[in-house]
Image: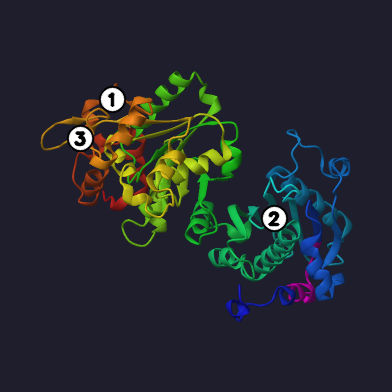
């Protein structure tokens, strides 16, 4: 990217120098796997003796284990490893630097544990990066941790990118912590977004007491920093690759505005079919409630409040939530395939099947519809379909009588013949008259009876938190 893009942004060198010239900031750099790429910038900027207590790279596994302890799973590029590094190095600073003699010192530890691209270029490279630090001497530590994926094709390029990212993180952690959304964007100073993906980030500590990490995940999506994020029912951000690893995956896409009895019936009946048909265990399976960015913006600009309303309700139902940029279903399946080789299923209302067979979605693909469907209907995938009821005629639509475009009928029959579509037969007929948009209208207009259309806990949470414009 050209220099003009960065004309109003301090250079990496000037950021490192400003940190070095701050007489209070003092700490340790511990970098494993890609060399000491971040601290190198501080040494090169000058005045590093004021800032750097220690710079190290415990590269050998035996040495690393001796310092930070062994990992139960034998992996070193993990969040657990990063946190052990941060804790160990800060403990040493606290023990070795007398607070009484240095009352104004702001201690920090910057750490990363990274695997850059291998020489055969089979593994692209990824890692965990973080800082634990103080902004006041008598204050507890704040922390920012993130997971990154490299998209450059040489280890040297990835190392340089990591060094720039590290400087950005340290600089803005100290000088921009009061604006976390802006801080997030500035992590890409002098870094092309195509070269680096930040797919998980978490803020904690006194500087970020009012930060909801789910909103930070949403910012990653909105800013084009990653394609998908996930968080658990308690609102903790999750690394998707870890969550999907060796898991069977059931994904349910929807607006969940709000989550209704229909949504939960689709989920529960699909999960039962998925487990039974594949003879798999629930503990080996992950269920995902997915909301696309286009859905979040369907009512105008993406609203943090609206997003949290949906997330809170799904959390109340004990569900993991994924936010993605995947407007087309084949992109979702392609993404899931990247991290799991096990069985997969999509759960949806049969009316949504029509959108899958709308060839307009695939005009940008060189291989068109056939390429998209090759990616969508993999060997491991099935689609569980919940029936649809025509509110005027009462007709029930299933996979047997759904109307797809004429030019797509042969393709549809092909996948139908090979059992890719499975009708949910033990559905609750009374649920076919429930539509979330109608429930939302009733809530907004303070009408009665909407509670009956929602799971009990969801209705309680809407009233308790006054979600979606609810008024007592």
* Residue 379 rendering spot, x and y as whole percentages: 48, 30
Q: Nearer the viewer, residue 151 or 414?
A: 414
Residue at position x 75%, y 42% in the image: 76
The correct choice, above or below, for 463 with respect to 93 in the image is: above
Badge 3 density bin: few <14, some 14–19, many ≥20, Cα 10 Å: some
**173, above or below 126, in the image:** below
Judge the density around disc 2: few (<14), some (14-19), many (≥20) Cα neighbours within 10 Å: many
Q: Is residue 113 visible?
A: yes
Q: Earlier in the sequence, mark 3 or mark 1?
A: 1
Residue 38 on image: x %, y %: 76, 63
Residue labelled with disc 2: 130
What's the image's color scheme?
Answer: rainbow
Q: Which mark is first along the chain, 2 or 1? A: 2
Q: Which residues are magenta?
A: 16-27
Q: Circle 3 sits on which residue? A: 433
Q: Position of residue 184 (x, y in %)?
A: 58, 63
Q: Which residue is mark 1?
A: 427
> Which secondary structure lies at badge 1?
loop
**Image height of 120 relative to 224, above or below:** above
Q: Quadrant of residue 433?
A: top left
State the CA–CA distance, disc 3 to disc 1: 12 Å
Task: Pick whichever, 226 or 304, lies toward us.
Answer: 226
Mark 3 element type: helix
Task: Indicate which disc, 2 or 3, sits on the residue closer to the N terminus.
Answer: 2
Name the element at disc 2. strand
In this rendering, position of residue 168 left or right of residue 193? right
CA distance for labels 2 and 3:
49 Å
Inspect this view and state whether residue 104 appears.
no
Residue with the most extreme left position: 393
């Amino acid at each position: 990217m050209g220099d003009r893009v960065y004309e109003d942004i301090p250079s990496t060198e000037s950021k490192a120098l400003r940190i070095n010239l701050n007489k209070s900031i003092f700490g340790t750099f511990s970098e494993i796997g890609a060399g000491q790429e971040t601290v190198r910038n501080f040494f090169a900027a000058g005045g590093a003796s004021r800032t750097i207590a220690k710079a190290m790279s415990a590269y050998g596994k035996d040495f690393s284990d001796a310092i930070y302890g062994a990992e139960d799973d034998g992996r070193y590029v993990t969040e657990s490893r990063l946190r052990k590094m941060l804790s160990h190095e800060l403990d040493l600073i606290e023990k070795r630097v007398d607070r009484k003699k240095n009352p104004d010192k702001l201690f920090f530890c910057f750490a990363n544990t990274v695997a850059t691209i291998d020489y055969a270029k089979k593994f692209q490279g990824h890692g965990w990066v973080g800082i634990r630090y103080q902004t006041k001497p008598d204050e507890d530590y704040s922390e920012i941790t993130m997971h990154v994926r490299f998209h450059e094709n040489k280890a040297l390029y990835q190392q340089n990118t990591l060094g720039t990212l590290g400087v950005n993180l340290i600089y803005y952690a100290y000088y921009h912590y009061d604006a976390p959304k802006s801080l997030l964007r500035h992590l890409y100073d002098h870094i092309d977004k195509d070269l680096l993906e930040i797919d998980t980030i978490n803020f904690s500590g006194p500087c970020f007491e009012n930060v909801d990490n789910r909103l930070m995940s949403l910012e990653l999506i909105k800013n084009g920093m990653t394609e998908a994020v996930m968080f658990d029912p308690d609102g903790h951000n999750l690394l998707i690759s870890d969550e999907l690893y060796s898991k069977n995956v059931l994904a349910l896409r929807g607006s969940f505005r709000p989550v209704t009895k229909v949504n939960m019936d689709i989920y529960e009946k699909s999960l039962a079919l998925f487990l039974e048909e594949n003879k798999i265990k629930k503990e080996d399976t992950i269920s995902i409630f997915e909301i696309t960015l286009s859905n979040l913006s369907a009512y105008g600009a993406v609203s943090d409040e609206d997003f949290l309303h949906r997330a809170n309700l799904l959390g109340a139902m004990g569900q993991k939530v994924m936010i993605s940029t995947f407007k087309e279903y084949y992109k979702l399946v392609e993404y899931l395939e990247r991290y799991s080789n096990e069985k997969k299923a999509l759960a949806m209302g049969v009316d949504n099947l029509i959108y899958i067979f709308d060839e307009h979605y695939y005009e940008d693909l060189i291989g068109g519809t056939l390429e998209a469907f090759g990616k969508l209907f993999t060997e491991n995938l099935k689609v569980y379909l919940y029936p649809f009821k025509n509110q005027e005629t009462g007709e029930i639509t299933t996979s047997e009588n759904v109307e797809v475009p004429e030019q797509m009928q042969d393709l549809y029959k092909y996948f139908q013949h090979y059992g890719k579509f499975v009708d949910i037969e033990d559905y609750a007929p009374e649920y076919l008259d429930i539509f979330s948009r109608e429930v939302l209208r009733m809530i907004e207009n303070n009408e009665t009876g909407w509670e009956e259309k929602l799971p009990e806990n969801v209705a309680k949470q809407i009233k308790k938190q006054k979600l979606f414009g609810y008024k007592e």
